[in-house]
Image (cartoon, rainbow, N blue to C red):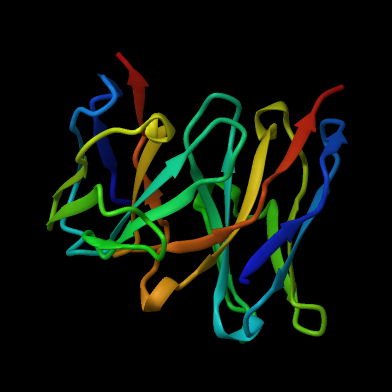
Amino acid sequence: QVQLVQSGAEVKKPGASVKVSCKASGYTFTSYGISWVRQAPGQGLEWMGWISAYNGNTNYAQKLQGRVTMTTDTSTSTAYMELRSLRSDDTAVYYCAREGYYGSGSYFPWGQGTLVTVSS
Amino acid sequence: EIVMTQSPATLSVSPGERATLSCRASQSVSSNLAWYQQKPGQAPRLLIYGASTRATGIPARFSGSGSGTEFTLTISSLQSEDFAVYYCQQYNNWPPVTFGGGTKVEIK
């Protein structure tokens, strides 16, 4: 079945970087894009950006430009999201999701989420 | 950026009753709208895409309607497993993709 499995929880200090992985299975990785969405504790969903697994093209949320980098490794069907210069308000659950369900821009499936805690 | 506004923020409903959730876009998104359900500690789950098409495996009690700027998610007869937070998402004009703030459906 189509599945996205993310890396485990991380605890980082302010100013550090974090890199979250998202391993895809059950479909042709390069046929879909991967989006990243985060959710701060008790808050709603915030779109972070998108990467084409076909050619590596990216689109990032304006507020994260310069701090975020999304990449893919087609040899392992894995997407990565790196966030630098971490601040306390980056504490959130980070999700990857496959974009393009039946040709739409909706997201299915989602990874299980990775909790990133930023604390001194 | 298209702003998505969901109402109400919280909806109190008895099991077996009908629930109607609203989502409004700040400008037309055509039918490029999805609905997601999220339970505590879980990732969001796609319910509806294209404003009105149920995703695979989604029960028929969930239905979506609307186009342009006004959208509705209806749960015809609430089951215990339907108590959750629901988000709408537009993917018509992006970047950025934008989500509504969510509607929490709670037991009355």
Foreground residue among B75 and B94: B75
Residue sitting at the far top = B108
Q: Position of residue A38 (x, y in %)?
A: 59, 43
Query: Looking at the rendering, which quadrant does residue B66 occupy?
Result: bottom left
The N terminus of chain A, quarter of image: bottom right
Foreground residue among B98 and A4: A4
Q: Position of residue A36 (x, y in %)?
A: 59, 56
Horizontally, is B103 left or right of B67 in the view?
right
Query: Looking at the rendering, which quadrant does residue B76 occupy?
Result: top left
Image point 29% across, 24% down: which residue? B15
- Looking at the image, residue B47 lies above or below residue A73: above
Image point 50% across, 63% down: which residue? A108
Foreground residue among A17 and B6: B6
The C terminus of chain A, quarter of image: top right
Image point 62% across, 81% down: which residue? A27
Q: Position of residue B72 (x, y in %)?
A: 17, 45
- Looking at the image, residue A82 lies above or below residue B74: below
